[in-house]
Image: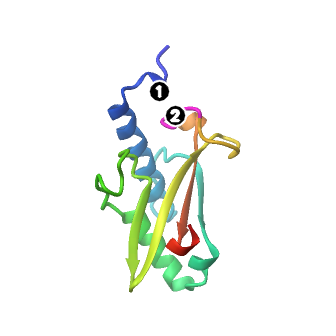
């Protein structure tokens, strides 16, 4: 039996990036992505303090984000991005956990063994 651990690193990175993209696009809930990986979308207190309008706009921007490059995404996983919202820099980070959210996923490219947490945060909160 072949597991995702048997994938070469380039194929695995492409698989994880596609899963992270599907998860990000599914956070709006208005346009469900078929077979989107499971997980949670959260924001820090600093982002929450920006107000509901900023939160909604940031959610839309994260879902549509497509500015990954080798500097900001060295593993090719599409796991982190930077958004400028009217002069306020906001980061998002996708972390890959086991199904109990207790530690890192044993096989990050296997949706059956991985849960995602996408966090919106201010750089000062990192």
Q: Examine the rendered structure and indicate whether residue 48 appears above or below residue 69.
A: below
For the stretch drawn in magenta, what is the main secondary structure?
loop
Q: Examine the rendered structure and indicate whether residue 73 appears above or below residue 110.
A: below
| 122 or 28, nearer to the observer | 122
Helix, strand or loop under label 1: helix
Helix, strand or loop under label 2: loop
Read off the residue under disc 2: 110
Left/right of residue 96 with respect to residue 75 in the rendered view? right
Q: Earlier in the sequence, mark 1 or mark 2?
A: 1
Residue 93 position, x and y percent, is 50, 59
The answer to if 121 sits in the magenta stretch is: no
Q: Tell me whether circle 1 and circle 2 mark residues in contact (CB < 8 Å).
A: yes
What numbered label is drawn on residue 52?
Answer: none
| 66 or 46, nearer to the observer | 46
| 2 or 73, nearer to the observer | 73
Left/right of residue 10 with respect to residue 32 in the rendered view? left
Q: Residues within 10 Å of mark 1 (few under 14, many from 20)?
A: some
Residue 30 position, x and y percent, is 48, 65
Left/right of residue 13 with respect to residue 35 in the rendered view? left
Q: Residue 100 appears in which quarter of the rendering?
A: top right
Q: Residue at x 36, y 52 (%)?
A: 73
Q: Residues within 10 Å of mark 2 (few under 14, many from 20)?
A: some
State how far apart marks 1 and 2 are (Cα). 6 Å
Residue 95 position, x and y percent, is 54, 51
Question: In the image, which residues are magenta?
Answer: 106-110
Read off the residue under disc 1: 4
Q: Residue 106 appears in which quarter of the rendering?
A: top right
């Amino acid at each position: 039996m072949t597991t995702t651990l048997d994938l070469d690193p380039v194929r695995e990175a492409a698989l994880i990036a596609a899963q992270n993209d599907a998860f990000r696009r599914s956070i709006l809930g208005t346009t469900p992505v078929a077979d989107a990986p499971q997980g949670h979308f959260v924001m820090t207190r600093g982002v929450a303090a920006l107000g509901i309008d900023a939160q909604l706009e940031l959610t839309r921007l994260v879902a549509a984000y497509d500015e990954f490059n080798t500097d900001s995404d060295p593993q090719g996983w599409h796991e982190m991005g930077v958004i400028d919202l009217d002069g306020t820099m906001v980061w998002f980070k996708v972390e890959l956990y086991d199904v109990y959210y207790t530690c890192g996923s044993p096989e990050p490219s296997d949706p059956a063994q991985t849960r995602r947490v996408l966090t919106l945060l201010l750089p000062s909160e990192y």
